[in-house]
């Protein structure tokens, strides 16, 4: 499979990443190698096989629908790179 | 004290021949004084540990029976959340992050009176097979410090091998407990998916991740697995209804049917690994097991299927990192979009970016059917094959890795070669099965080689019994590393 700049840019957008030129060069080589290794999956006939996204067929184990204390807001906000008293600070998005 | 196993240590503490604080001081002191020789510890939580030791000691002194591991120090892979103690995932992206909550396993350890002494190095976000991709530098193998400790739980395995902690926890998404145990000559268990709560384990691939114990021998690992297993209302995939209780009944393996996948021993495996794993099968046979050979179907598809699914799930899980709520935020970002993109681009390392982009690719329009959907279908076939195999066998014995520990830097620039090193471990996670890993010999350089026993879902007790019989007949698990370069 041809890994061109257009595909790398598309994947950067999907992944919300901006790579350096060196990272782009390495990723193009690596992706080509990895995807050629993955191409062998096409050899196997899987028509009609159901997809398995999980190792078991269990239904979710839900907890009781009971009110519980929330986490401490101050402790949560302490982790924010930028904050004011009660909120996370993000750049202005509406002029 | 450092060469005692965890159950011996807990006996001394229970009998008040050794104080819990004394044990904490010994292990944390050694970690501090020795200058972290294997680069295992990211954080040593001495102050916190001493406070906990005081509380546990008071209960022991009052005659309370807490648990078989009460007072024993334990260290955790640094992707397991600890309230008030930094949890880095060995990533710049977690810069400054201190969890507000603890993982359920941490609460369970503390309820059992165990004492957390620190957080351990790993591959960044558990993505890697050599513990070289993290932001804190590579973990060094105590058997030969020029070699990798394996990954991604390299710090957890090396800390036990280097006698820096009597017990540790790791996580296993595609072999991340088992392969470092094999490389470092220690024992570990990858539990059945759903046996141990994943709440608070920073998610890599949610349908594959499991937390598990690493120790000097299978009895220590079984004791720790009993502590951390059990239901948790905070993890909707934690299916187990009560914690494991393991007995000590079996003295031989009479009648136990063990399958040996013939094609795992064909091309690509080092001769010394083949020899030692085959010898382990013979030892189990001598203990009464009935060994039967078979060809593992779909072997060539396992690694591609695993990486497609793991990367797809990783690309989704890691989309939570936005530079706003916690962790690293780019100083250069001016707009909201730049906060997202630049923080992620500067915060994640190359292997993490590679996996996020690969995951985005296999989930993207036009490629979804050929890659992701196809991988999920083959996952179903792999699961069916295991179901069929467990009608014939009680467990399967297999190599853990095709090689022993390789040199630091040897494979880091060749991701496909690194991924192929997971060939014997990933299918266990795809099918959600348990596996026990333990040392079974040494290669010609004196490096440890491990073997794994894979069982049907929730058959941990059988695997532990078999490993225990093996360890009573051999002494590989008692050997300690010298650390010289080879």
Image (cartoon, coloured by chain):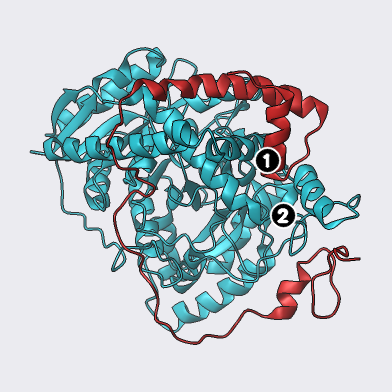
Chain colours: A red, B cyan
Query: Looking at the image, is B399 positioned above or below residue B344?
Result: above
Q: Which mark is residue B94?
A: 2
Q: Position of residue B362 (x, y in %)?
A: 53, 36
Q: Which residue is mark 1?
A: B134
Residue located at (43% from left, 47% from top): B208
Q: Residue at x 85, y 63 (%)?
A: A93
Instruction: Describe the element under mark 2 as helix, strand or loop.
Output: helix
Q: Does B197 appear above or below B453? A: below
**Residue at 52%, 85% in the rendered image:** A68
Q: Nearer the viewer, residue B167 or B273?
A: B273
Residue toward you, B163 or B130: B130
Indicate left or right for B303 with B263 as reference. Answer: right
> Split into 4 quadrants, where in the image is the C terminus of chain B?
top right
In this view of the protein, can residue B376 be seen by the observer? Answer: yes
Chain letter for mark 2, please.
Answer: B
Say if B444 sits above or below B148 in the image: above
> Is B365 above or below relative to B199?
above
For label 2, count other residues whose C-alpha is less than 10 Å away and answer few (under 14), some (14-19) or many (20+). Answer: many
Residue B302 location (% of width, % of height): 39, 30
Residue B360 located left or right of residue B70: right
């Amino acid at each position: 499979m041809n890994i061109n700049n257009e595909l790398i840019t598309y994947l950067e957008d999907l992944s919300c990443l901006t790579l350096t030129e060196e990272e782009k060069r390495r990723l193009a080589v690596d992706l080509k190698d990895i995807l050629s290794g993955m191409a062998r999956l096409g050899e196997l006939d899987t028509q009609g096989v159901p997809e398995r996204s999980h190792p078991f067929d269990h239904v979710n184990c839900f907890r009781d629908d009971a009110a519980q204390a929330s986490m401490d807001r101050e402790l949560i906000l302490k982790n924010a790179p930028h904050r004011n008293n009660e909120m996370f600070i993000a750049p202005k998005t509406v002029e | 004290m450092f060469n005692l196993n965890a159950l011996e240590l807990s006996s001394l503490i229970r009998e008040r021949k050794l104080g819990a604080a004394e044990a904490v001081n010994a292990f944390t002191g050694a970690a501090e004084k020795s200058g972290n020789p294997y680069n295992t510890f990211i954080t040593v939580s001495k102050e916190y540990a001493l406070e906990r030791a005081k509380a546990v000691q008071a209960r022991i002194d009052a005659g309370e029976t807490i648990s078989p591991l009460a007072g024993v120090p334990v260290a955790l892979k640094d992707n397991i959340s600890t309230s008030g103690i930094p949890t880095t995932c060995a990533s710049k992206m977690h810069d400054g992050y201190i969890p507000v909550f603890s993982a359920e396993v941490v609460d369970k350890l503390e309820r059992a009176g165990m004492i957390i002494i620190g957080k351990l190095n790993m591959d960044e976000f558990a993505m890697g097979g050599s513990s070289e991709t993290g932001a804190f530098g590579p973990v060094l193998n105590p058997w030969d410090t020029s070699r990798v400790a394996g990954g991604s739980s390299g710090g957890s395995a090396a800390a036990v091998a280097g006698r820096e902690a009597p017990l540790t926890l790791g996580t296993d998404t595609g072999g991340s407990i088992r392969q470092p145990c094999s490389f470092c000559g220690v024992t570990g268990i990858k539990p059945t998916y759903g046996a141990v709560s994943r709440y608070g384990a920073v998610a890599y691939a949610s349908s594959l991740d499991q937390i598990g114990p690493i120790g000097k021998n299978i009895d220590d690992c079984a004791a720790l697995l009993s502590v951390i297993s059990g239901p948790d209302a905070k993890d909707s995939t934690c299916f187990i209804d009560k914690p494991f209780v393991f007995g000590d009944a079996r003295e031989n393996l009479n009648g136990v049917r063990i399958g040996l996948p013939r094609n795992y021993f064909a091309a690509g495996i080092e001769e010394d690994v083949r020899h030692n794993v085959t010898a382990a099968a013979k030892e189990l046979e001598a203990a009464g097991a009935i060994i039967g050979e078979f060809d593992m179907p779909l072997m060539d598809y396992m690694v591609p299927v695993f990486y497609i699914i793991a990367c797809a799930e990783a690309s989704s899980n890691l989309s939570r990192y936005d530079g706003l709520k916690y962790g690293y935020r780019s100083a250069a970002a001016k707009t909201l979009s730049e906060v997202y993109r630049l923080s992620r681009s500067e915060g994640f390392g190359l292997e993490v970016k590679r996996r996020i982009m690969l995951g985005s690719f296999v989930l993207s329009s036009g490629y979804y059917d050929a890659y992701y959907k196809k991988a999920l279908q083959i996952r179903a076939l792999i699961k069916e094959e295991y179901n069929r195999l467990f009608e014939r066998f009680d467990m399967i014995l297999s190599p853990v890795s095709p090689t022993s520990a390789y040199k630091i830097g040897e494979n880091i620039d060749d991701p496909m070669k690194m991924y192929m090193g997971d060939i014997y471990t990933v299918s266990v996670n795809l099918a959600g099965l348990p596996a026990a890993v333990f040392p079974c010999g040494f290669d010609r350089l004196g490096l440890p080689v491990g073997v794994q026993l894979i069982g049907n879902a929730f058959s941990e007790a059988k695997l532990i019994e078999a490993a225990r019989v093996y360890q009573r007949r051999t002494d590989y698990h008692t050997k300690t590393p010298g650390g010289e370069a080879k």
